[in-house]
Amino acid sequence: MLAFLTQRLLQIIPTLILVSMLIFGLQQLLPGDPALIMAGEERDPKVLEEIRQQYRLNEPIPVQYFYWMKGVLSGNLGESMRLKSSVASLVAEKLPVTLQLAGMAIIVALGIGIPAGIISAVKKDTAWDYGANIFALWGISTPNFWLGILMIFLFSVTLGWLPASGYVRLGEDWRASLATTVMPAFVLGNAIAAVLMRHTRSAMAASCRVTGSFCITRAPTPDLSRIDSPRFPDSTPLIQ
């Protein structure tokens, strides 16, 4: 198992390098000059030259990629042009809420998708099965932004149960934190739950076809004590 995970992790490295080269190359094809954007409206030639030297915009694209990759590997993700702060600090600031939302979305997906798939497989061709399939179709078909708007309108505007926006850290007030993240977590986990339901149902159905368990209602076992055993004459040998 450890060797398999190590092999998979090693396969990710060249994939990430190729993806980074592709994204960096496509970024160079975008119209416009970053130095002109950062220089503002005056666009002083001296300022433009300083910006190009600072960000190595005068260097060839492979050299720019080398310096960018060197900065990424050393933890320097660059500086935000709009906020004038390091990208690493911005990522670290938003990472807790991202991890919290991802964890809650996974819990929602597992808590809904797997039980619904099992029930759909066990109760095949029943109202439970049809209801689970309708839920899966609804979860896959409904756009996340539309479901989010509907939930805000229902639970925030109409009922007033949950806040429409904002975020409270989990360490400050866990109740307020859950109240601000439960709706987006459900929206994110809804589509994943629908996919999990379909996969679970298919896996359960395949297991039922192979092993005959779970989904097949077995006939009652007959009482063998009431069946008379065959009797043979003593003179008749059973084995010649």
Image (cartoon, rainbow, N blue to C red):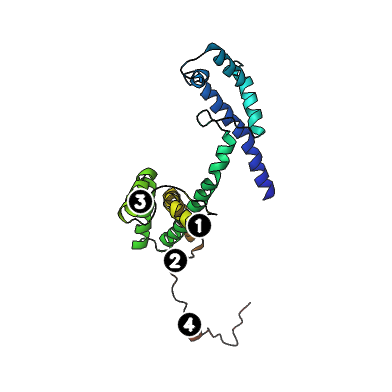
Of marks 4 and 2, which one's residue comes earlier in the chain?
2
| Image depth: mark 1 or mark 2 in front | 1
Spatial separation of the CA atoms under disc 3 and disc 4: 57 Å
For residue 71, side relative to residue 198 (left or right): right
Of marks 3 and 2, which one's residue comes earlier in the chain?
3
| Image depth: mark 4 or mark 2 in front | 2
Q: Residue 198, image x and y in percent?
A: 43, 52
Where the C terminus falls, by quadrant?
bottom right
Give the residue drawn at x 51%, y 19%: 39
Give the residue at mark 1.
Answer: 174
* Contact flag, marks 3 and 2 (Cβ < 8 Å): no
Give the residue drawn at x 44%, y 66%: 216
Spatial separation of the CA atoms under disc 1 and disc 3: 21 Å
Q: Amino acid at mark 3?
A: Met
Spatial separation of the CA atoms under disc 4 and disc 2: 21 Å
Most extreme residue toward the top, as rendered?
45
Give the residue at mark 4.
Answer: 223
For residue 31, side relative to residue 148 (left or right): right
| Circle 3 SS class | helix
| Image depth: mark 1 or mark 3 in front | 1
Residue 49 visible to an observer of this rendering: yes
| Image depth: mark 1 or mark 4 in front | 1
Q: Amino acid at mark 2?
A: Ile
